[in-house]
Amino acid sequence: MDTTHYDVIVIGGGAAGFFAAIQCKNLDKNLAVGILEKSNHVLAKVKVSGGGRCNVTHHMPEVKQLLTHYPRGQKELHSPFTNFNILHTIEWFESKGVKLKIEPDGRMFPVTNSSQTIIDCLLNEISKYKIPVMFNCDVIEITKAENIFRIVCRDERTFTCSKLIVATGGFNKASSYDFIAKTGVRIVDPVPSLFSFKIQNSPFKDLPGSVIQNALVTIVHTKQSMQGPLLITHEGMSGPAILKLSALAARELYECQYVFSIRINALPMLKQDALRQQLYDIKTTNAQKKVCNTPIDELTSRLWNRYCVLSNISPEDVWQSVSKKDINVLCEKLQNLVVDVNGKSLNKEEFVTCGGVDLKQINLQRMEHKQIPNLFFAGEIMNVDGVTGGFNFQHAWTSGYIAACGAAGGGE
């Protein structure tokens, strides 16, 4: 087969890859830039993220605060996020006619509430710059000789380029990184990040869809904890508190093979003495009412009823019959409920990994490999992952932009 040459090749047709290719052409319109995509479609994660709305970024302009949402890469990303931050992301999309909105929790979506808006924006830029996308290009080998990269695909198609940006996203198997590891790039073995917890004997298993709005979830015998909404699912528990905790403790949970215990505080805003007093006050003013019919404000009726059952308070019990011991048990269940976890559940379309190209090898001011000039990285191929809420996309835009600056600005 003939070999096709480009000035810059981007491997990966996701958010980071598209953004890097677009920025390369924006910086130098004379560059020949091409994208190699393993599958027969592009921007798959963009399409499904945020429930099909695309959580583009998170409104957190302060870099120091933003960094706390990256379990891997927290220290290393300070310079990149200073160079291209959330405000730059917002400005770029709005310059293309895509207005973003801020939700109460800080997440940012297109005002259309449709990921297709972001997809169309990126596709329009690719079309405007006439950047070709080659589909079904499963890269199996990369070599470099005389400052030229040679890229071989599984179907034997071959490409060459002067500058190479790898933006394939993360993989769930170490062997999937072989195509880049064989060049001498060091890989941190991948493990899952951002996953729900499977709980076989969940005390809430028949209440799927219920939400504890502000739960504090702690992994027992550790200091790892996270606060936020907790969603009850058919398989166990999910929601921002669980997903963020899974990212924070990704390697520890992998090492214990996802068998561990969590402690759930459904009312972390109250100290236990204050909660106990609140329950005594309810008892005083509602002596003849059924306990199950007088939920505290922070919990839904279904969840309150379940906590009553867990505390051995029957549906017929009235407050007058509730003893001091009963209230102590109820307090304990509300703020120190221990649940055993038996595994994890993954959304394959939104799969995020902890692992990838070791950050110690990368000049993060250019996203360039320190020992292999003109080899750049963008997105989740690197050992960087953010918690849920638009943080992984922000890293994609930032790293894509910086990699493009390095690739379009000339090698060292």
Image: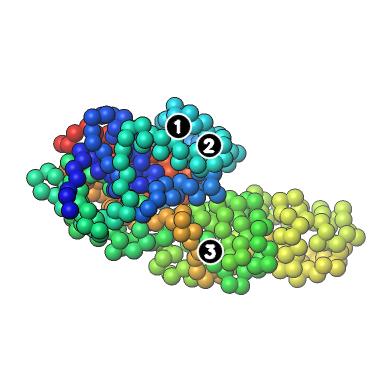
Distance (Cα) linking label 2 and label 1: 9 Å
SS for callout 3? strand
The location of residue 213, given as percent across then percent down, is: 64, 51
Quadrant that contains the C terminus: top left
Residue 132 lies in quadrant: top left
Within-10-Å neighbours for mark 1: few <14, some 14–19, many 20+: some
As drawn, the label of residue 110 is: 2
Task: Tell me how far mark 3 sits from mark 1, CA to CA.
Answer: 35 Å
Q: 16 left or right of 210? A: left
Disc nearer the start of the sequence (2/1): 1
Name the residue tied to disc 3: 197
Q: What element does badge 2 sit on?
A: strand
Crowd band around label 2 with a 10 angstrom C-alpha radius: few (<14), some (14–19), many (20+) = many
The x, y position of residue 397, in whole percent, is 38, 39
Rendered image coloring scheme: rainbow
Circle number at residue 343: none
Query: Left or right: where does residue 253 sit relative to residue 239?
Result: left
In-front residue for pair 367/3 = 3
**Residue 331, how many percent across, how many down?**
70, 61
Q: Amino acid at mark 1?
A: Phe
Q: Amino acid at mark 2?
A: Pro
Residue under numbered circle 1: 93
Give the residue at the far front of this rendering: 1
**Does the residue at mark 2 contact the one at mark 1 (Cβ under 8 Å)?**
yes
Mark toward the start of the polypeptide (3 vs 1): 1
